């Protein structure tokens, strides 16, 4: 696919070249903890097929990905006791995309609590592992 870099960080995670804290996976998708979370419980959902943006993924891949977003979002909301959710998806640099593999952010939200700024600070590994287990157990 033109413009898709098979060495992007999410492609490396899918190949097992880089670790992640898995929350959920099925035949077509993978959900894992964001290492620079905007809130505790921030999860990313990606298709396993190579797709740079929402415009590049197959209709079947997009359908599978959004179904996983919904499934994981329910678990994030329940596990984190969230009042609501912010679900984000960015396309290309001008749209705010930083990693060029299609991905959806699921961010649990509490009334009156702002999201943390995107500072580049990584969360403690043990905290991400703990949250991944908590959210995984809530998936139905």
Image: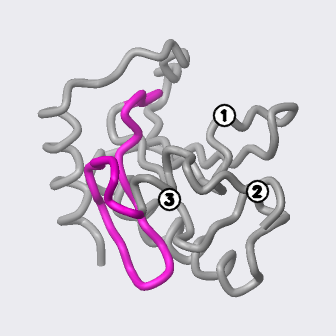
Helix, strand or loop status at disc 3 = strand
Q: Residue 133's quadrant in the figure? A: bottom left
The range drawn in magenta is 15-39
Which circle marks residue 53 in the picture?
Answer: 2
- Left or right: where does residue 15 sit relative to residue 133? right
**In terms of depth relative to the viewer, which is nearer, 42 or 52?**
52
Residue drawn at point x = 49 percent, y = 42 percent: 107
Residue drawn at point x = 58 percent, y = 81 percent: 64
Residue 124: % across, % down: 21, 25
Determine whether label 3 and label 1 are within 8 Å by CB: no
Helix, strand or loop status at disc 2 = loop
**Is 26 contained in the magenta span?**
yes
**Is 48 contained in the magenta span?**
no
Q: Main secondary structure of the magenta part?
A: loop
In the rendered view of the protein, which quadrant contains the N terminus?
Answer: bottom right
**Rounded to the nearest whole Å, what is the CA distance between mark 2 and mark 3?**
13 Å
Residue highlighted by disc 3: 45
Residue 127: % across, % down: 17, 33
Mark closer to the chain start, 3 or 1? 3
Mark closer to the chain start, 2 or 3? 3
């Amino acid at each position: 696919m033109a413009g898709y870099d098979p060495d992007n960080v999410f492609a490396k995670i899918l190949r097992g070249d880089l670790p992640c804290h898995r929350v959920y996976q099925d035949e077509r998708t993978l959900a894992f903890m964001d290492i620079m979370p905007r809130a505790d419980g921030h999860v990313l959902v990606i298709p396993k097929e190579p797709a740079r943006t929402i415009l590049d993924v197959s209709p079947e891949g997009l359908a599978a990905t959004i179904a996983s977003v919904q499934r994981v979002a329910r678990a994030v909301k329940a596990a984190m006791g969230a009042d609501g959710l912010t679900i984000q998806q960015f396309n290309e640099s001008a749209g705010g995309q930083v990693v060029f593999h299609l991905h959806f952010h699921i961010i649990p939200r509490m009334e009156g609590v702002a999201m943390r700024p995107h500072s580049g600070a990584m969360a403690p590994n043990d905290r991400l592992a703990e949250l991944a287990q908590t959210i995984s157990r809530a998936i139905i």
